[in-house]
Amino acid sequence: MATKNNRMNYCAFCGRSQNQVPELIKGPDVNICSDCVMMCNQIMGEDQSAQAKASGQTKDGGGTPVDVTKLKVPLPHELNARLDDYIVGQTHAKKVLSVAVYNHYKRLRQGLRFENDADYRDIEIEKSNILLVGPTGCGKTLLARTLARCLDVPFSISDATTLTEAGYVGEDVENILLRLIQAADGDVARAETGIIYIDEIDKVGRKTENVSLTRDVSGEGVQQALLKILEGTVANVSPHGGRKHPQQEYIRINTDKILFICGGAFVGLDDIVRRRLSRQVLGFSGATAEQRNDELSPAIEPEDLLHYGLLPEFVGRLPVVSTLNSLNENDLVRVLTEPKNAMVRQYQKLMAMENVKLSFTRDAIRELARLAARKKTGARGLRTLIEHVMLDVMFEVPRRRNLTTFKVTRKMVCDQAMQTADDSKAA
Ligand SMILES: Nc1ncnc2c1ncn2[C@@H]1O[C@H](COP(=O)(O)OP(=O)(O)OP(=O)(O)O)[C@@H](O)[C@H]1O
Ligand SMILES: [Mg+2]
């Protein structure tokens, strides 16, 4: 105990006691004096400038400059094919993303390509951030996750729902940059060439009903904070996440080259589009309530997004808008069976671990898709349904040692659906 107390009053680096140093900074288990802190700073500064000299470049946030000639650039059709492996339908969104990512790589290489070409040298290719709009369970987040698997640049996914204006409970907007830096293993220079997906962006729409006293800290304030980052700025990121405070050291990161993809369900946007369309055709309804959202979605105009609560400057920074379709019954059949990671395959793998070969009859699959389509929650409904059906199977199979095959039939699906309906009625 005595030694611990002693240690508490000494600098762990130079060994001097509290009385011999200008200031002793105390940590939970160890202390450091202000002289040693200064010396460390000096050493780190020398280290960094030596590194920068060696590479002929100085970077604000440190990290080695990216050798863009070594990046593996996937061609748009190749990327599209990778997305096809995992995602059913959504042809337009896949094409938009494939081209956007390809152009992102090209932008990174533009300096090299036209170094000695007076015609193009001074032309700066700007980025085109993307907005993905589509109903729940249609594959927005899945698209982002799948992209992350196929890329050679850092890619991170953040959720806009957790963000609040600086100074309020929640996450600072800069934390989305921290996530990208983490995806680049702390290498800021690499992170500066990355791509960020911001999910649930519709949740930062201005709350119009929020008339007064309470500030709209999770809506407009967040959009304002995002504006600068989307456009390109040098941001100060707190290295451990959380809130910034004045004594802290920051990582400086330039967001100029970072490509932003935002995604959101925008529930109710179709009504806004429908209203605008019917206003445009005076006296006649340009779009009926029965018209499917899919038919309306290509008609989304920036003004609809403004009505939804996005700021004009925010919409302006997302020039490419792609809409994803809701999934119909046929799509849902394909979702169950076709993707590399299809739900049916996942359960087959689970059962294979018990040495049981699991199969579904065609009409069982069709029935699952039909029931899920009725729920109107896209492929999300499928997961719940199949989970219910498989519960009994997964409970029983492990104890039946001699079982080698198991077939899920339409009757099993229907019985389960009826029972779930009864249960919810009783509740
Ligand atoms: N087009 C699709 N192809 C294959 N699977 C899909 C597709 N859409 C959704 N899924 C399945 O449904 C799950 C949920 O989809 P996802 O998370 O992408 O929905 P989302 O569009 O982000 O919805 P939300 O707006 O509710 O977040 C995925 O993990 C995947 O299993
Ligand atoms: Mg999602």
Image (cartoon, rainbow, N blue to C red):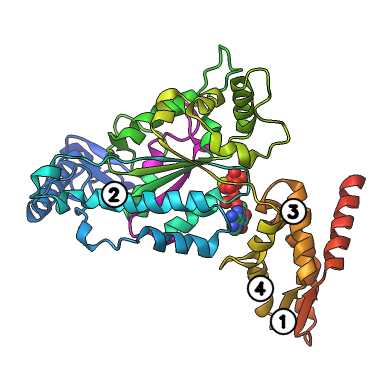
Q: Which residue is mark 3?
A: 372
Q: Which of the two labelled residues, at mark 3 and mark 2, occupies the earlier sequence position?
A: 2
Please, what is the three-letter code of the amino acid marked with disc 2?
A: Thr
Question: Crowding at label 1, few (<14), some or many (≥20) Cα neighbours within 10 Å?
Answer: some
Give the Cα separation between the discs numbered 4 and 2. 39 Å
Residue 19 relative to residue 181: left or right:
left
- 17 or 154: nearer the viewer: 154
Circle 4: residue type: Leu
Q: Up-down: is 411 above or below 117?
A: below
Tell me if mark 3 has few (under 14), some (14-19) or many (20+) residues whose alpha carbon lies within 10 angstroms of its own.
many
**Residue at position x 74%, y 53% in the image:** 372
Quick check: is the Cβ at mark 4 less than 8 Å away from ligand 1? Answer: no
4 vs 2, front mark: 2
**SS for callout 3:** helix
Q: What residue lies at 88% left-to-right and 62% top-to-bottom?
A: 415
- The residue singled out by tag 4 in the image is 350
Chain-order first, disc 4 or disc 1: 4
**Alpha carbons under labels 4 and 1: distance apart:** 9 Å
In the shown orientation, is residue 88 left or right of residue 44? right
Can the viewer see residue 390 in this picture? Answer: no
Residues at marks 2 and 1 touching, judged by CB atoms closer than 8 Å: no
